[in-house]
């Protein structure tokens, strides 16, 4: 049996044996590693991992407490809820028994985060900072620390936030923060008397809305006045105006209320389908929402609006997408089967299955697909048209990914718009993926399916295809303009007004005879970003449409006016902004004008004020 005097003492840098008299016995008992004189002079660092590996390889299993106290050390404190299921198939996280889907498979909290050794939970230590990562020994903990310290503090904060959210949910409070590809939404709801709730939208606001802090409605203002009293309420409003006048950005709007009943019907409907999970309130609010849609009139493109056009401001998810993301099964099933709302299942700009897979709501997604939803659907709101499989993979949802690939027929090798496969997308868009057991499991699953995931030469063919697609789209727009110009010439019209000073010029054909061709040219130039020319053509087409109709406020003039105003605003030039302002005012004064014309007027005045222009009404 080896004694302490005969214990082998090695240099921590070069791993050569040191003389016994170099250091005292007490120093080695305190596990202080030392270097020889040559290594110390040259500045060579100590390699703790290799040193411990050499020392531990020579030890025989015994009851000596000095050699067995590391592996038998139990983590302190109460048992915590386990992290997400790992489900790895590779050797690093190989389960002791069972398969990935089996009940006997090892979970993430049974596995050392560094070496992958599977142990019973009682035999593992936990990180004292985040309480989420487990190790089989102090050696593995020290070896993993340089990498783990980058995410430890964030994981600690996430754990605290999750604990606060669970505590708030027990009281009936709701506090969520969610993001999409176009913006984000924050909801802080405190039911009951004396509670002030907040809705924070960050993204493109609705027409006529100003950024800053506001009351959600007139009823919300009255509710706040009753809550604060006649003396404190003016002080609160003054503080609100001062904070709103500060630079809060042009896309952030905060609304306050004291009760959900104070909100407009549209907000009540969306919140009830999303974070509040209140199907009765959603059903009560739906008739009012449909009425608002009915009185809003036609959309600028002449189509009839429906319930799918009602989305969360900035966040841009419709009611079914929000219910799917939140996992509200009963509400999602009602929306998918009700004849008034099931249009959201099949709209081209709706992707409820993608959002359900993002939060691992597999059963809910199966129900949506059964009722006719497209599992492949994606939109710009889904983080720039990200494939649903990528969306689930980046969030570490292995079960949702397997459902899409194995049951819905998704291609695991599918690339996103940037030509990245699912493994590359996971690494680039989730910087802490290596510390998430679910993300590691997704990476292992994709690797087992043959996905390369090479970072340096990632999918050159896919990138070339994406570049060719962009070039093809540009060529398509050019071809569209050329075809529109040819049709205009065939109809006898010209894009530019003829020179009337030339007496030899033939009499121009009546513009009303080639109105559709003229507007087609304007649309093509707008799509190409030639806003100044498009605005001039829309202006000409507007007056032709007005004189062609039976009365001055013919419904056909408003979509043309809307396009002209949008083109003028896109130019950003003062001349065009003044022209758009006059056009908007003229159409607002006409009886029967649609709601989007009023929104256009507010948008033009907001842009003019930002540029320091003087805003004057007729």
Image (cartoon, rainbow, N blue to C red):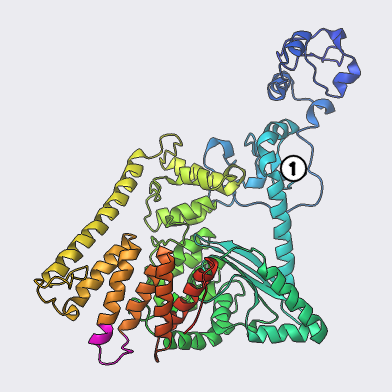
Name the foreground residue: 57 vs 503: 503
Residue 287 position, x and y percent, is 49, 88
Q: In the rendered view, tell whether residue 238 sits above or below residue 426.
A: below
Q: Residue 311 colored magenta?
A: no
| Horizontal arrangement in the rendering, residue 146 relative to residue 459 (left or right) | right
Q: Is residue 350 something that shows in the picture?
A: no
User: Does residue 99 sit above or below 557 in this rendering?
Assistant: above
> Is any atom of residue 408 visible in this view?
yes
Q: Residue at x 55, y 47 (%)?
A: 430
Q: Residue at x 50, y 63 (%)?
A: 356
Q: Position of residue 478 (x, y in %)?
A: 24, 57
- According to the image, label 1 marks what residue? 127
Q: Which residues are magenta?
A: 545-555
Q: Residue at x 36, y 43 (%)?
A: 463
At a point 83% along the width and 26% down the height, the residue shown is 66
User: Can residue 549 be found in the magenta stretch?
Assistant: yes
- Under circle 1, the secondary element is loop
Quadrant where the N terminus sits is top right
Query: In which quadrant of the rendered view does residue 16 lie?
Result: top right
Q: Is residue 554 above or below residue 32?
A: below
What is the crowding at mark 1: few (fewer than 14 residues within 10 Å), some, or many (at least 20)? some
Quarter of the view holding residue 408:
bottom left
Q: Is residue 453 left or right of residue 330?
A: left
Residue 270 vs residue 295, the one in the foreground: 295
Residue 426 lies left or right of residue 546; in this view the side is right
Of the pair 393 and 380, the residue shown nearer to us:
380
How far across and how far down the image is residue 98, in percent? 55, 46
Q: Magenta segment, principal secondary structure?
A: loop
Q: Is residue 564 above or below residue 203?
A: below
On the image, the x and y values in percent for residue 462 come to 34, 44
Nearest the eye: 534 or 576: 576
């Amino acid at each position: 049996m080896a004694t302490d005097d005969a214990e082998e003492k090695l240099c921590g840098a070069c791993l050569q044996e040191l003389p016994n008299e170099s250091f005292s016995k007490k120093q080695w008992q305190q596990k202080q590693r030392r270097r020889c004189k040559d290594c110390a002079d040259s500045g060579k660092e100590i390699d703790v991992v290799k040193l411990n590996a050499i020392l531990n390889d020579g030890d025989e299993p015994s009851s000596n407490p000095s050699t067995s106290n590391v592996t038998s050390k139990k983590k302190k404190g109460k048992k915590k809820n386990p992290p997400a299921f790992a489900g790895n198939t590779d050797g690093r996280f190989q389960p002791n028994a069972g398969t990935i889907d089996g009940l006997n498979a090892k979970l993430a909290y049974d596995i050392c985060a560094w070496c992958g050794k599977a142990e019973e939970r009682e035999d593992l230590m936990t990180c004292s900072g985040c309480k989420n990562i487990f190790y089989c020994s102090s050696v593995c903990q020290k070896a993993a620390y340089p990498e783990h310290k980058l995410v430890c503090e964030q994981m600690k904060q996430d754990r605290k936030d999750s604990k606060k959210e669970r505590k708030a949910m027990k009281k009936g409070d709701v506090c969520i923060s969610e993001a999409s590809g176009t913006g984000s939404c924050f909801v802080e709801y405190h039911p009951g008397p004396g509670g002030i709730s907040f809705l924070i939208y960050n993204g493109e606001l609705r027409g006529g809305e100003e950024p800053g802090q506001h009351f959600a409605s007139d009823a919300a203002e009255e509710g706040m006045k009753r809550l604060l009293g006649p003396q404190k309420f003016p002080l609160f409003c003054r503080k609100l105006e001062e904070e709103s006048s500060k630079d809060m950005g042009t896309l952030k709007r905060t609304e306050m209320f004291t009760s959900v009943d104070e909100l407009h019907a549209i907000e009540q409907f969306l919140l009830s389908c999303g974070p509040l999970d209140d199907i009765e309130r959603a059903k009560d609010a739906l008739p009012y929402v449909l009425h608002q849609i009915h009185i809003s009139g036609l959309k600028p493109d002449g189509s009839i609006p429906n319930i799918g056009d009602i989305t969360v401001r900035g966040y841009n998810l419709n009611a079914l997408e929000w219910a799917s993301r939140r996992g509200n099964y009963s509400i999602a099933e009602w929306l998918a089967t009700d004849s008034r709302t099931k249009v959201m299942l099949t709209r081209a700009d709706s992707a409820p299955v993608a959002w359900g897979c993002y939060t691992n709501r597999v059963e809910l997604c199966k129900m949506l697909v059964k009722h006719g939803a497209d599992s492949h659907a994606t939109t710009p709101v889904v983080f720039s048209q990200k494939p649903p499989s990528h969306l689930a993979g980046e969030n570490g949802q292995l079960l949702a990914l397997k459902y899409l690939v194995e049951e819905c027929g998704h291609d695991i090798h599918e690339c996103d718009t940037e030509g990245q496969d699912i493994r590359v997308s996971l690494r680039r868009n989730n910087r802490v993926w290596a510390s998430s057991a679910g993300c590691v499991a997704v990476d292992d699953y994709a690797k087992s399916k043959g996905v390369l995931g090479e970072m340096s030469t990632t999918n050159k063919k896919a990138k070339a295809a994406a570049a060719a697609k962009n070039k093809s789209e540009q060529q398509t727009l050019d071809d569209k303009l050329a075809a529109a110009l040819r049709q205009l010439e065939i109809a006898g019209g010209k894009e530019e007004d003829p020179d009337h000073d030339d007496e030899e010029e033939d009499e121009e054909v009546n513009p009303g005879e080639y109105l559709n061709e003229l507007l087609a040219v304007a649309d093509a130039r707008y799509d190409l970003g030639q806003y100044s020319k498009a605005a001039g053509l829309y202006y000409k087409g507007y007056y032709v449409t007005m004189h062609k109709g039976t009365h001055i406020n013919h419904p056909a003039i408003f979509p043309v006016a809307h396009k002209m105003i949008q083109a003028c605003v896109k130019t950003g030039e003062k001349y065009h902004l003044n022209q758009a302002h006059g056009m908007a005012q003229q159409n607002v004064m006409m009886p029967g004008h649609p709601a989007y014309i009023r929104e256009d007027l507010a948008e033009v005045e907001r842009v003019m004020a930002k540029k320091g222009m003087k805003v004057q009404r007729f």
